[in-house]
Image: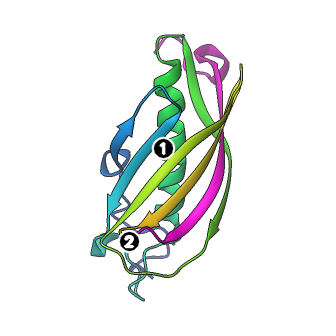
Amino acid sequence: MWGSSSSVPPDFPSPDGLEVVVDGPSGLVRGQVRVTDAIRGASGHVHNGVLAGMAVSRASSGTSRAIAGSGRVGVAVSMDMYFLEVIHPLRFLGEATVRNSGPTEWIWDVDIADDPGRLCAMGRVTVWHRVREEVGLGGQ
């Protein structure tokens, strides 16, 4: 599909490509990804993995920023995504909202829309936060 046996685009946006627009202590994280040919498949549609990556990136970064300095690290462990519309936007806008911020996990609802605000995908991401040593990171 992208010139190889991989089903993931070769130029899949890195976390840096998922621009954070707002990231505050309120449990709300907004971000966007601009649509380029690098994330479109042969049909011209954006690969759903880009939207899934956008969802997990927003939830993980929101949890990680909230627990920064606590000696803990956030690890995304579960994600359910629903892809609703096949569209051709210039960018996708994602908004992740905390539904639960418990002592060991945070649960986020994520909506992804196009520029005019049409809902394109929605999902729920669960992010565990654990002591660094518990996930094999030691003192890094």
What residue did someone put label 2 on? 116
Residue mark closest to the camera, 1 vs 2: 2
Q: Residue 34's spot in the image, x, y percent?
A: 30, 63
**The N terminus sits in image quarter:** bottom left
- Between marks 1 and 2, how big is the CA–CA gap? 21 Å
Q: Eyeballing the image, is 48 above or below 2?
A: above
Residue plotted at (38% across, 80% down) = 88
* 108 lies left or right of 43: right
Q: Please state which amino acid type lies under the numbered disc 1.
A: Arg
In the rendered structure, find residue 103 and report the number of the disc placed on it: none
* 41 lies left or right of 85: left
* 62 lies left or right of 107: left
Residue plotted at (35% across, 75% down) = 89
Q: Residue 130's spot in the image, x, y percent?
A: 65, 20
Q: What segment carries the magenta color? A: 116-140
Which of the two discs, 1 and 2, labels the residue nearer the N terminus?
1
What residue did someone put label 1 on? 58
